[in-house]
Amino acid sequence: MNPVGISLYVEPIIGTKDPHSGQDKRTYSLEGFLLLQKNFRDDTVIWMTNLGIESTYAKRAALSDLPPDFEWPVIPEMEIETSFGTGISGRIASNWYLGAEALYQSEFETEVGQERWSVFAGPTVHYGARKWWATFTWFPQLRGGGEVVAGQNNSHLHLVEKTKHEWRLKISYNF
């Protein structure tokens, strides 16, 4: 019953492959989020907001025998991604909550400035027991922009690094 719950989430990430091509690419990232939560009406309505930033250093390994028009830069890149999410949920039965969540993400890269941005929003279902909880979210991309790949239709979505639909399942054990 505190006025506002505050948490900090920090995660180091090391990658070895480019997720789009499968080629060797070393990435070192540090992600941090400020998580805020406010409970209302005897914990039957919950509002949350997340503010996040991720910084990534990436370097691709050189590839031989590439076509002359194939873009595969080997100079190191720096990326910064910002995220802002908010949502609200209400208890519909004992331990069960139904709600909606929205997320805005934007990525900035060394050579291009703002590389992409995306807006997602969708429903969420949460189950919370005393020692564990699970949250399932469907996040269709509503709008997006930035880098476009040749042959991509103009759908007003960013489909290079994001998808039309994201599904998330988070499971946690409280200890």
Image (cartoon, rainbow, N blue to C red):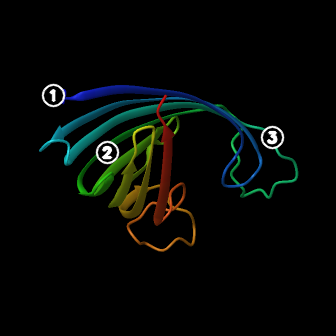
Spatial CA span between label 3 and label 2? 37 Å
Residue 103: % across, % down: 34, 50
Q: Residue furthest right?
A: 65
The N terminus appears in which quarter of the rendering?
Answer: top left
The percent position of residue 105, horizontal first and vertical second, equals: 38, 46
Q: Earlier in the sequence, mark 2 or mark 1?
A: 1
The residue identified by callout 3 is: 62
Mark 2, residue position: 85
Q: Residue at x 64, y 34 (%)?
A: 58
Which comes before the other along the chain, label 3 or label 1?
1
Amino acid type, callout 2: Gly
Residue at the location (57% across, 67% down)? 150
Q: Residue, x 38% and y 34% (percent of image)?
A: 52
Rounded to the nearest angstrom, the CA distance separating label 3 from label 1 is 53 Å
Label 3 CA crowd tier, 10 Å (few <14, some 14–19, many 20+): few
Choose between 159 and 69: the one closer to the eye.
159
Q: Which residue is mark 1?
A: 3
